[in-house]
Amino acid sequence: MTAAVLYLSVNPLETRVAMRENSRLVTYRVERQRTSSLVGNLYKGRVTRVLPGMQAAFVDIGAGRDAFLYVREAGGILEDFSDLFQNEEGEDLPPDLSDSDISDLLRQGQEVLVQVVKDPLGAKGARLTTYVTLPGRCLVYLPTVRQRGVSRRITDPEERARLKAIIDGFGDQQGWIVRTAGEDQGAAELAADRAYLIELWQKLQNASERRHAPSLIHRELSTVLRTVRDMFTHAVREAWVDDEASFGEIVDFLEQADPALAPRLKLYDKSTDLMTSFGIDRELAKALKPKVWLKSGGYLVVNQTEALVAIDVNTGKFVGSSSLEETVTTINLEAVREIVRQLRLRSLGGIIVIDFIDMGEPGHRREVYEALAAELATDPAHTQLLPMSDIGLVQLTRKRSRPSLERTLNRECPYCHGSGRIKSLPTICLELRRALLDARAGRAVGDRLSVVVHPEVSQFLQGPYRDLLRELEEVHGLEVIVRENPLCHQEHFEILG
């Protein structure tokens, strides 16, 4: 059984959330005051543009830039869900609108109730859906569909069947999903959560009818309470919070939602930073490097690009004790657990390609693939795993609702502009040589030019590349005076007459 510890560090400027499972950091989130998440908010929006070629529409929700609504997410505006289909578990799902025309569903100027499912990222606006989901403590209410289900993180078959029977007995036509926190809860607790969510939905509908678009209809809970609602389950041994006001807010919430968890909440009242004191910052810095070492001596290389995330598995220092095939399989199996941890920790989503070390035996490839599938089953985010190729490549998709941790904590390098590379010193020096010769064109032999460069370039010119300056003077008759400026970009230089 997973033993988890939750950490919340709260101040007026940011809220940091971390979770350890079995003493290993698996989750770290930051929400800052000026960049708080929109995910979960409900808006009454106005369609500003319908794009039949993209089967999507732009919707003004009053967030500064238009949000995006795909046709497959637009079915929530329909009143008749007669065209239902079922998934492999026999659960009803929304109508499949993939082949529908967006122009038949939406028109410019139309007002629609939408929910944010993905925050704005870069130049892209928020992603929307009309399939509203209202999460409670134990249940998620889906008022626009008839889907019924149980969280896949509840794995006991008897418990799943018991919970499914309870929500099937609700007797309404709306959708209900039992959350992880609903495990071991009785019918009375689930019924109370249901009543609260139905009442909330009625209030939101009434508010939507009264207001004009664009308008915020419902704001998600604060980061602190949302974290407690979503992550503080009975699997959490203890939860630490370093803000007294937030501590009181959480206690009040737990006394209503789940009183049994209240004694597990601890107030951290020391002067040192909570995340530093518990070693979270140190572990995070280590885990977020491109190269992640495994205990065996192997390592992963995690590379996030605009198109996809590539993860490469390498043998590193591990040489094994038997055959090469056994060594490779051992490293791949160890890498599986760390890969899923990195996906959760870094909030990586979209297309992910994993390059396992090549295994010759089909049985070993199957063993690694099954281990990956089992580990992904513990991931709260929805994933879709494709079969492993003969050369050990695995592709999967992971649902992304917020920017990755790297994009949240870091910014683009002003030197390389996100490429991860800058020009080498020899390249810069040879470019400088060509520029000097161009500047000398038309001048008399014996001319002198000054050049302003970064100190590292200066040292390289007067060290390993000193023959370049000598060649300019002896062959081309050009004397070059090198001046250093530490504020100069390493790739840039200035030639003075």
Image: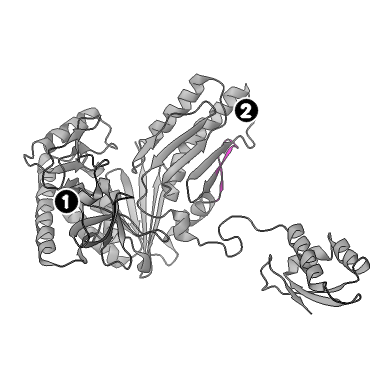
Precedes in sequence: disc 1 or disc 2: 1
Q: Does 369 lie within the magenta span?
A: no
Of discs 1 and 2, which sits in the foreground? 1
Expressed as whole percent of the image width and height from the top left, the position of residue 63 reads: 30, 66
Q: Is residue 23 above or below residue 84?
A: below
Q: Quadrant of the rendered structure where residue 483 is?
A: bottom right
Q: Image quadrant for the C terminus?
A: bottom right
| Residue 116 % position (x, y) | 27, 56
Which amino acid type is marked by label 1? Answer: Ile
Residue at the right extreme, as displayed? 474
Magenta stretch: residue 295 in it?
Answer: yes
Residue occupying the point 26% across, 67% down = 62
Q: Amino acid at mark 2?
A: Gly
In the rendered structure, which segment of residues is drawn in magenta? 289-301
What residue do we see at 16% from left, 34% from top?
164
Q: Is residue 84 left or right of residue 320?
A: left
Identify which residue, 336 or 280, lies in the foreground. 336
Residue 432 visible in image? yes
Residue under numbered circle 1: 77
* Residue 320 - label: 2
Q: Position of residue 128 (x, y in %)?
A: 28, 54
Write the residue at 22% across / 62% down: 45
